[in-house]
């Protein structure tokens, strides 16, 4: 028997027992679909984080009271006891860091309430900033202008808004020059940012940017959890030297002991992405473990069904052997059937996983990126399950005595 004939028989056998085949493949389908969906989501989120959330550039670093990416509970608790960064810290870094091309400061309130006329919008991110933050955070303007130095010096009640503010509160109206109320305080719109879209169903365009001094005047200068961002004049060693300069300045201002650790955190693009990769890596391993259990269960079901098939087709096996089929022919036939069964389940699982991932992306905005290597790996794993769990039933069929098989009654 050649391979093509064995494949044809396997497909006919699957088609002849549709319900049994579907139930048999369920474990493999779920396992492969889970792997594909997880890999697709992890790749999508990593790409999104790399391109948008941590889009600092290779020459940008940020100083925090405590890093938002900290994964150590003790470090987080210790960080909450630290002194806040201040505008004086920002000015000291700006003046003293010779390898920094730009230095900015910013602070946020994530639950602002914005009102224009009778229309209102809640859960708005209200950020106070210095002009250089537009460079270090790569903030683009669609119309109008960005917050300037004169706005900062004069505590000007001006704001740059996201497109959600424009589209929800003032549709069809030119927002430039209009007055809005942010948590009860009045600001004049001077610019509108470029549209960013959504992530996980959360809009990235529901924000108000204002001068840092105006923000502190409204929300207070204490407990601001202010951050200082800086753009170095170069990457690699230059970036490291710029970070060292800023670290020395802050340590001196905050009176950190020579032998002690920093009373602040400092991160750059690569360090933030490394922390994120570790987090998603742990999630990925956990999900792969769960999917592996499903694959094992699916493999056991395939082996059980193949043993049933061997019993049902005992006389067929006897006839084939009586007509000259070798043990290797019978072994190959049943092994190919097991592999075909698992591979079909793998193909369905791949399609289902991609469909689920893209469906979730359309529904809630979860980023997803399909990788060819993940599709190939899913199919290879499915085929491997078929080989591993199909060997025993195939060998059992090959070892049947042709005389006893011909006498067998189902």
Image (spheres, rainbow, N blue to C red):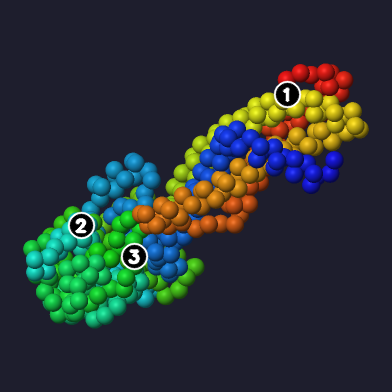
Cα separation, mark 3 vs mark 2, equals 16 Å
Residue under the image location 31 percent in, 52 percent down: 66
Judged from the image, the secondary structure of the residue bearing numbered disc 3 is loop
Residue under the image location 35 percent in, 72 percent down: 138
Residue sitting at the far right? 324
Give the mark, 3 or 1, whose residue is nearer the N terminus.
3
Answer few, some or many: residues within 10 Å of disc 2's Cα (few below 14, many 20 plus, some between 14 and 19): few
Residue 20: % across, % down: 60, 33
Q: Point out the frontmost of discs 2 and 1.
A: 1
Q: Which mark is residue 284?
A: none
Q: Quadrant of residue 175?
A: bottom left
Answer few, some or many: residues within 10 Å of disc 1's Cα (few below 14, many 20 plus, some between 14 and 19): some
Q: Are marks 2 and 1 in contact (CB under 8 Å)?
A: no
Q: Quadrant of residue 123?
A: bottom left
Report whether 285 appears left or right of 399: left
**How many discs appear?**
3
Reading the image, the residue beneath label 3 is 197
Quarter of the image that includes the N terminus: top right
Give the mark, 2 or 1, whose residue is nearer the N terminus.
2
Q: Point out the frontmost of discs 3 and 1.
A: 1
Reading the image, the residue beneath label 1 is 311
Residue 374: % across, % down: 58, 52
Report whether 316 appears left or right of 67: right
Residue 388: % across, % down: 70, 34
Give whichever of 191, 262 is nearer the camera: 191
Q: Point out the frontmost of discs 3 and 2.
A: 3
Give the mark, 3 or 2, whose residue is nearer the N terminus.
2
Cα separation, mark 2 vs mark 1, equals 65 Å
Cα separation, mark 3 vs mark 1, equals 59 Å
Reading the image, the residue beneath label 2 is 123
């Amino acid at each position: 028997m050649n391979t093509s004939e064995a494949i044809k028989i396997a497909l006919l056998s699957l088609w002849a027992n549709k319900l049994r085949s579907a139930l048999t493949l369920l474990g493999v389908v779920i396992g492969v679909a889970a792997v594909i969906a997880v890999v697709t989501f992890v790749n999508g989120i990593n790409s999104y984080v790399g391109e948008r959330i941590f889009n600092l550039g290779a020459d940008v670093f940020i100083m925090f009271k405590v890093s938002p990416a900290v994964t150590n509970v003790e470090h987080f608790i210790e960080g909450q006891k630290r002194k806040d960064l201040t505008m004086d810290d920002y000015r000291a870094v700006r003046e003293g860091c010779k390898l920094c091309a730009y230095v900015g400061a910013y602070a946020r309130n994530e639950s602002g309430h914005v009102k224009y006329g009778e229309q209102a919008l809640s859960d708005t991110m209200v950020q106070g900033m210095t002009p250089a933050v537009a460079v270090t955070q790569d903030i683009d303007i669609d119309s109008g202008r960005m917050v300037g130095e004169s706005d900062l010096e004069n505590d000007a009640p001006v704001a740059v808004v996201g497109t959600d503010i424009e589209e929800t509160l003032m549709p069809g109206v030119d927002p430039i020059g209009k007055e809005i109320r942010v948590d009860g305080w009045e600001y004049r719109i001077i610019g509108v940012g470029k549209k960013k879209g959504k992530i996980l169903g959360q809009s990235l365009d529901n924000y108000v940017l204002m001068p840092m001094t105006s923000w502190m005047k409204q929300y207070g200068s204490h407990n601001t959890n202010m951050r200082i961002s800086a753009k170095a004049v170069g990457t690699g060693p230059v970036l490291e030297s710029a970070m060292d300069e800023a670290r020395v300045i802050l340590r001196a201002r905050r009176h950190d002991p020579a032998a002690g650790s920093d009373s602040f955190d400092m991160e750059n693009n690569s360090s933030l992405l490394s922390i994120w990769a570790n987090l998603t890596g742990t999630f990925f391993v956990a999900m792969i473990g769960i999917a592996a259990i499903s694959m094992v269960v699916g493999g056991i079901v395939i082996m059980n069904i193949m043993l049933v098939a061997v019993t049902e087709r005992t006389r067929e096996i006897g006839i084939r052997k009586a007509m000259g089929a070798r043990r290797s022919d019978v072994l190959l036939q049943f092994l190919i059937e097991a592999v075909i069964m698992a591979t079909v389940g793998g193909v369905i699982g791949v399609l289902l996983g991609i469909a689920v991932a893209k469906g979730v992306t359309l529904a809630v905005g979860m980023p997803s990126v399909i990788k060819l290597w993940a599709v190939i790996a899913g199919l290879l794993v499915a085929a491997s399950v078929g080989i591993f769990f199909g060997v025993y039933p195939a060998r059992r069929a090959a070892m049947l005595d042709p005389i006893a098989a011909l006498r067998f009654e189902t």
